[in-house]
Image (cartoon, rainbow, N blue to C red):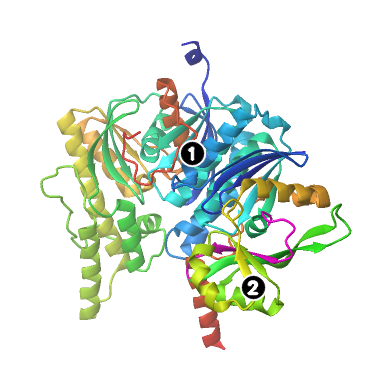
Amino acid sequence: MKILAIEASGPVAGCAVLEDGLLIADYNVQYKKKHAQSLVPMMDEVKQMLELDLQTVDAIAIAKGPGSFTGLRIGAATAKGAALAMDRPIIPVPTVDSIAYNLYGTDSLICPLMDARRQQVYTGIYEWSPCHDSEDGRCFRTVRPQCVISISEIAQDLNARGRSVVFLGDGVPVSRDALKDLMTVPYSFAPAHLDRQRAAAVAALAWSYYQEEGQACMVSADDFRPEYLRLAQAEQEHSERRSFSLLLEK
Amino acid sequence: MSDLKKNITILAIESSCDETAASVVVNGRRVLSNVISSQIDIHTLYGGVVPEIASRKHTERVTQVIRESLQEAGRTLEEMDAIAVTYGPGLVGPLLIGVSAAKGLSFATGIPLIGVHHIEGHISANYIADPSLEPPFACLVVSGGHTHLVLVRDYGVYEILGRTQDDAAGEAFDKVAREIGLGYPGGPKIDKASREGDPHAIVFPRGKVAGSRYDFSFSGMKSAVLNYLNTSRMKGISVNVPDVAASFQQAVVDVLVSHAGDAIDQYGLQKFALAGGVAANTALRAGMKEMCDAKGAAFYCPPPILCTDNAAMIGSAAYFEYIKGNFSGLDLNAVPGLRLGQR
């Protein structure tokens, strides 16, 4: 099972190749150059470096969102085009889950924070909990699925759980001061090599889905769509107007 | 040169505004398929194209549309000589979907990529509509986002004679249609309403741009309509909507036709072509034809399906780039403000 993974949901453009659980390439760049220009050349570089015959790739994994709307779509359209040409399925991976998956084996709760602007973060809560299914007795578990909420709301949730927390993600720099005031449980921040979106984490998590679920974790190129967790602003306003006028009718 | 003896088949993708389109075109003239997935129903809800919603819809539809275009053409992706895509001008979000999908296809197949200018596509629709058409000729490109009077000196060699200084012609149609209660999209609605109205009932100004013979200005004409509506309202005079529509349309058509006629005279042209979504307007077609006939110039105008945004026109324009060996790298980006002739 060979997986080509794509990450373009946030500040990082990345691609990775994972073959039967072995990571053979992981290329991530967090630089001002836009994903529109960098992502596909990076994929091509990896392809050439590995002398990769794309017909040997079984699936394309992608960070499906949330994230930058434009970044998500650059990744999605690239993955869909490539998957169509290769006649291969897509394995969608929730972005926040894949960021959390950078960390392994900690007893703390894992809480990725992505800057979602408008005073909100894309976040979720994860843990490595004891389980009998896996060889090393620990399983990656979602405690609170990815969502878009305020930093105070996620802090409140974490405090109520009474466990230490590791924060990571591009939302950390903008939330650091707020966390100082909000957090009552012990917390720390992941170091630089673990704290951003990473294509290898997308690939590895997709591989774990495949081991657990088989083909059920896959969708066709046509059916894949990003998960924005937010409506377009116009849709939001439109639905607000509609619920307001429905209210008036009542 | 052996390459040029065989047929060149191009898969083209277009997503610069609110149509997701893909097409297979042979030698820039013969269309094997022309699939267009329109989002007009969704945007009508909002009274115009919402870029974020358009981008989301493009993302959902893009591979189906490409797949359908290949199926309809009875060709496989591997049989394509190039993959062409509109990379500007247009809305950046929507453009990026076509560009990214095209790059994904090119990355996975090794088939070369050709970035195409949207307006060059519109002009090239005329090569499909009339396979005998050859440059030089002048072309007026009029749509919701563009108003360009272009001198086509040779294949892929353009000189812009004039462009709009403010609203595009189609944009002015949209705004006026909204004000007189016809709704979106304005072009077809004004065209239809005008058939019941008198084009000479109200005299709206014919917009001119000082010191520039071929440039256009439509915002003043649009304001004149708004002023007329306000004045009528204040005086309690009921407005005859078909008359307003017909009179405004006539004013726009007069300006477009007179600029086109000047270009034919100055450059001694024997051919004149129309292109873009507004080229589907019946009064504009009639006015241009009449003017060209009077000057003894041949008049070209694609059928409506090739006037509105489509990918066949992109496949046609791409063919002439292919011949010249103009290919794009996998770092091709969307350029929303791309100028004609820029590369």
Check disc 2: other Cα within 10 Å, few if <14, some if 14-19, many if 20+.
Answer: few
Q: Is residue B149 above or below residue A47?
A: below
Residue sitting at x 70%, y 77% = A162
Q: Is residue B336 above or below residue B196?
A: above
Residue sitting at x 61%, y 31% = A47
Q: For the residue labelled by badge 2, is the local secondary structure a helix, a strand or a loop?
A: loop
Residue sitting at x 31%, y 37% = B340
C-alpha gap between disc 1 and disc 2: 57 Å
Residue A29 vs residue B164, the one in the foreground? A29
Q: Position of residue B19 (x, y in %)?
A: 49, 49
Residue extent of the magenta highlight = A101-118
* B280 displayed left or right of A166: left
Q: Is residue A58 above or below residue A49?
A: below
Residue of label 1: B311
Q: Position of residue A18 (x, y in %)?
A: 71, 40
For residue A186, the mark is: 2
Q: Is residue A226 visible?
A: no
* B186 displayed left or right of B159: right
Label 2 amino acid?
Answer: Pro
**Mark in front: 1 vs 2:** 2
- Protein chain holding label 2: A
